[in-house]
Image (tube, grey):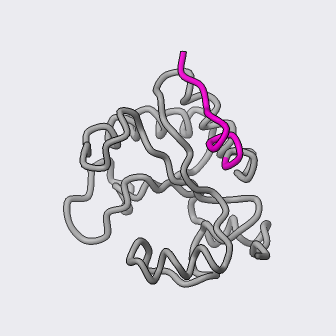
Amino acid sequence: MPSFGSASLKSRAQLHPKLQAIVDEAIKHVDFKILDATRGKAAQELAFKLGRTKAHFGQSAHNYVPAIAMDLFPAPYDWDNTQAFVNLWKIIMPIAKTQGTPLRWGGDWDMNGQVNTSGLVDLPHYELNPWRDWAKSSHLVED
């Protein structure tokens, strides 16, 4: 059975308990890494500068503690393997639904059950939805 490595466990510890419950169940079914959870100001601005996000610090669900967003990277760990991200989504979303956790995926922003093929596509990204409501019970991370 797959299990989290030390880097994923460190990111997992930053997640909102509802997200922790989702990844804890999902890892029983599919291998993946938790790449990112809480992102501080320096990391957020670097991600913006590198074009990995369109959000400045305070405008991203990753900027809160506990983390209300997470980036997941499915095995076989190939950024070009879109199908692996879709397969992970097909496992994550039913778990979230069963647990009663409103979750939105960066490959289906409008939550219509279809993978986005144009516009902003962020296949690793999952967030509690609507994240701005969840942010009200969290606080901005301090660097």
18 relative to 4 in the view: left or right: right
Q: Is residue 10 magenta?
A: yes
Residue 121 position, x and y percent, is: 31, 63
60 relative to 109 in the view: left or right: right
**Residue that lies at the very extreme toward the front in this rendered image:** 6
Residue 37 position, x and y percent, is: 63, 57
40 relative to 92 in the view: left or right: right
Q: What residue is rendered at 63% in x and 72% in y?
A: 132
Residue 64, located in which quarter of the rendered image? Answer: bottom right
**Which residue range is magenta in the image?**
1-11
Given residues 65 and 3, the one toward you in this image is: 3
Q: What residue is rendered at 57% in x and 51% in y?
A: 102
Residue 113 position, x and y percent, is: 32, 47
Q: Quadrant of the N terminus?
A: top right
Residue 38, located in which quarter of the rendered image? Answer: bottom right
Q: What residue is rendered at 69% in x and 40% in y?
A: 9
Q: Is residue 79 magenta?
A: no
**Residue that lies at the very extreme toward the left in this rendered image:** 117
Q: Is residue 32 above or below residue 140?
A: above
**Residue that lies at the very extreme toward the top in this rendered image:** 1
Residue 116, located in which quarter of the rendered image? Answer: bottom left
Q: What residue is rendered at 49% in x and 22% in y?
A: 29
Q: Is residue 83 above or below residue 126?
A: above
Task: Please tell me how many numbered marks the rendered image carries.
Answer: 0
Q: Quadrant of the C terminus?
A: bottom right
Residue 134 position, x and y percent, is: 69, 64
Q: Is residue 96 above or below residue 48?
A: above
